[in-house]
Image (cartoon, rainbow, N blue to C red):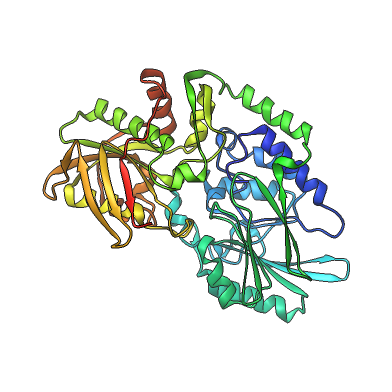
């Protein structure tokens, strides 16, 4: 569901495709990030997901990091109101499974019993502002306990609902699991590791995967080719219209792509647009001495349809749909080089060759053969270790342990509007016409 809530056509076809596959011998499973993110999740605080759930009737689900975007209390409320059975073996609140969910469960299809358990990336608290409210137990140890309980009960198959991302392979190697249904990483995966089937549908609701546990076969269903649930699509259109998100703030003649390639493969027009808006807002607030660099983390740019023609407030909110302010921090040149170097580091939700930074006001050259930042300039001058610089970033990055850890001790000199409000203001004042300029050069790939 991640990145699909804001496109009524895609939501309708996803529901239509699922319902066309579903039947008496099918169990419908979710692997997290179904409550958020997106524009409609943001304005309804996740409520919109309940309408999608009612349309498809899921059986089991686990938590993704974005399911906590509106805080643990809101997540718990939505869980209680959801039709499916939520499972988590490692998300703990006050010593008990979060929201009173089960650690594992057994579902029966005819004469076949299938044991399910849920597991979530333990770095999730660092991706939100609720650290201390929830505890995330070691996922492998929690998985082993759940698998042991299920095997003791003689289930025919054990299935992991996993929001671990790249750690799914470690889960499969460490535990006696027949199938891992994965999430978190935005790319599709269908493979086997030592007899365990590993799957992941990717983001954007583009694919539904159907797994036959007897044969281990995986069938891909392309959502764009599927039937349309017109009632659900119309409901989403109605909510988008009533949310007042259709005000036009700019125009784009040459469509600006928003796929994973634009987000994670280095410099892109959409990345430059966001980073330019951040630097523009920061320079208006704090000036240009010391020099300002704008930085957007790749994972914060949400994929979706290209920005094209008339661009609305909803389009730009959907680009970075998070209630996080933009902050300006001051740091040394040595610290800035460290931050820029961390663009090559891949957190658990990314593929090994992804790039995690979009910049404005800086140019950099990274050599992947040597795993080093070979060159970095700001305002046309090499970054000096002892010089001072300012960086405009989402406040989220100051608390995200897995992304740009150098920023954890950063000194905030100013706090600006919410990220998407900065984009809207920039589009109105400057326009939307980004170009690729050679800001990020990656060598050795």
Q: Residue at x 51, y 18 (%)?
A: 248
Q: Is residue 199 left or right of residue 424?
A: right
| Residue that lies at the very extreme toward the bottom in this rendered image | 152
- Where is residue 182 shown, x and y percent of the image? 61, 60
* In front of the other: 189 or 182: 189
Q: Is residue 383 left or right of residue 306?
A: left
Query: Measured along the vertical axis of the image, is residue 89 above or below residue 52?
Result: below
Q: Residue at x 29, y 53 (%)?
A: 366
State the count of labels: 0
- Where is residue 411 shown, x and y percent of the image? 23, 45
Q: Which of the 4 quarters of the picture holds residue 217? A: bottom right
Q: Residue at x 33, y 32 (%)?
A: 276
* In front of the other: 440 or 98: 440
* In front of the other: 71 or 418: 418
Q: Which of the 4 quarters of the picture holds residue 88? A: bottom right
**Is residue 216 visible to us here?**
yes
Q: Residue at x 78, y 75 (%)?
A: 156
- Where is residue 133 shown, x and y percent of the image? 48, 55
| Residue that lies at the very extreme toward the front in this rendered image | 444
Q: Is residue 120 left or right of residue 181?
A: left
Q: Which of the 4 quarters of the picture holds residue 417? A: top left
Query: Measured along the vertical axis of the image, is residue 225 above or below residue 349?
Result: above
**Is residue 413 visible to us here?**
no
Quarter of the image where the C terminus is located: bottom left
Query: Measured along the vertical axis of the image, is residue 386 above or below residue 39?
Result: below
- Where is residue 344 shown, x and y percent of the image? 35, 55
Query: Measured along the vertical axis of the image, is residue 251 above or below residue 41?
Result: above
């Amino acid at each position: 569901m991640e990145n699909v809530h804001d496109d009524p056509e895609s939501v309708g076809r996803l529901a239509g495709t699922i319902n066309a596959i579903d039947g008496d011998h099918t169990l419908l499973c979710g692997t997290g990030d179904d409550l958020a993110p997106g524009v409609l999740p943001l304005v309804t605080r996740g409520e919109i997901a309940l309408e999608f759930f009612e349309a498809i009737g899921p059986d089991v689900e686990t938590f993704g990091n974005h399911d906590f975007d509106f805080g643990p209390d809101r997540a718990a409320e939505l869980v209680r109101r959801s039709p499916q059975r939520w499972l988590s073996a490692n998300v703990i609140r006050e010593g008990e499974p979060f929201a009173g969910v089960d650690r594992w469960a057994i579902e029966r299809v005819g004469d076949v019993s299938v044991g399910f358990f849920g597991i979530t990336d333990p770095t999730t608290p660092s991706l939100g502002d609720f650290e201390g409210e929830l505890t995330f137990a070691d996922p492998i140890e929690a998985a082993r306990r759940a698998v042991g309980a299920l095997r003791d009960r003689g289930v025919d198959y054990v299935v992991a609902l996993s929001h671990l991302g790249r750690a799914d392979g470690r889960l499969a190697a460490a535990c006696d699991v027949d199938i891992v249904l994965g999430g978190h990483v935005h790319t599709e995966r269908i493979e086997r590791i030592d007899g365990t089937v590993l799957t992941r549908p990717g983001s954007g609701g583009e694919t539904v995967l159907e797994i036959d546990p007897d044969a281990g076969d995986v069938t891909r269903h392309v959502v764009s080719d599927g039937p349309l649930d017109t009632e659900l699509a119309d409901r989403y259109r109605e909510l988008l219209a009533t949310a007042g998100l259709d005000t036009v703030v700019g125009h784009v003649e040459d469509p600006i792509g928003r796929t994973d390639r634009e987000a994670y493969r280095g410099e892109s027009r959409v990345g430059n647009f966001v980073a330019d808006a951040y630097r523009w807002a920061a320079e208006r607030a704090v000036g240009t001495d010391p020099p300002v660099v704008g930085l957007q983390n790749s994972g914060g740019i949400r994929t979706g349809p290209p920005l094209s023609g008339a661009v609305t407030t909803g389009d730009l909110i959907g680009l970075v749909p998070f209630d996080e302010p933009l902050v300006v921090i001051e740091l040394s040149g040595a610290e800035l080089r460290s931050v820029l170097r961390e663009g090559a580091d891949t957190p658990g939700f990314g593929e090994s060759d992804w790039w995690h930074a979009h910049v404005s006001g800086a140019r950099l050259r990274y050599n992947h053969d040597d795993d080093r930042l070979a060159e970095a300039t700001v305002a046309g001058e090499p970054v000096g270790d002892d010089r001072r610089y300012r960086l405009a970033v989402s406040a989220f990055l100051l608390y995200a342990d897995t992304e740009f850890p150098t920023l954890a001790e950063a000194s905030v000199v100013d706090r600006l509007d919410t990220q998407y409000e900065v984009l809207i203001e920039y589009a109105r004042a400057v326009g939307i016409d980004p170009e690729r300029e050679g800001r990020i050069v990656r060598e050795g790939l």
